Amino acid sequence: MRRLVNYFLRGLVVTAPVALTLYICWVVFQRVDRLLGLPVPGAGFVLTIALITLVGVLASNLFTRGIVGAVERVMQRLPFVRLLYTSTKDLLNAFVGEQRRFDRPVAIRLAPGSAVKAIGFVTADALDALGLPGQVAVYLPQSYNFAGALVVVPADQVEPIPADSAQVMAFIVSGGVSRL
């Protein structure tokens, strides 16, 4: 009986992530299709991906860069929109943009002399402009969440981690379950 329970649990570990991923993809397909009013399942999702790629091509074009710049200037002038736009843009650029920020994994000591450490990414080397000389900004992503905390620590409490930043991010987000 115990062996049967172990097989069931092992099957659950394999099946649940696949089923959840497929379900979420199916819901996204249906919602995009419903929003666009397309009768072919998945066509709206493919159309959305194609449209986003087309915008990327146009944004890379010298002619349309001026238009993109004008749209960004308008977004920067609207008070509430500016907050949402710049925060979203900075976050996406930090992960996938040309100016990636989460590329320096580190371990920080939570208190001087303490053995307890947190894993994160250096996002700013110098905070002199904030009146914090000798301090660095470290972003600590949360596990199983798309959030995190920004901490400011003395530079001597930061130890570089010699590992790929994508693997370190996966390790943190998985709660330490993912392998490095």
Image (cartoon, rainbow, N blue to C red):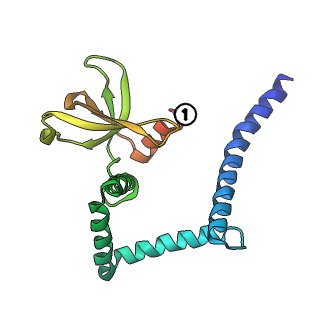
Residue 91 as seen in the image, left or right of residue 19: left
Q: State left or right for residue 142 relative to residue 61.
A: right
Position of residue 161 relative to residue 166, above or below, is above
What residue is drawn where x is 72% and y is 73%? Answer: 39
Type of the residue with mark 1? Val
Q: Quadrant of the N terminus?
A: top right
- The foreground one among 30 and 56 is 30
Q: Is residue 45 above or below residue 154?
A: below
| Of residues 166 and 125, the one drawn nearer to the viewer in this rendering | 125
Q: Which of the 4 quarters of the picture holds residue 56?
A: bottom left
* Residue that extends furthest to the bottom in the rendered view of this protein: 63
Give coordinates of residue 25: x percent, y percent: 65, 56
Q: Nearer the viewer, residue 169 or 137?
A: 137
| Residue at image point 62% right, 71% down | 36
Mark 1: few/some/many CA within 10 Å (<14, 14-19, 20+): few
Residue 71 visible in rendering: yes
> Residue drawn at (15%, 39%), measured in percent from left and top?
130
Q: Name the residue carrying label 1.
A: 177
**Residue 32 spot, x, y in % from top left:** 62, 65
Q: Is residue 169 above or below residue 113?
A: below
Is residue 121 placed above or below 93 in the rendered structure? above
Residue 22 left/right relative to 78 = right
| Left or right position of 64 against 126 | right
Q: SS for tag 1?
A: loop
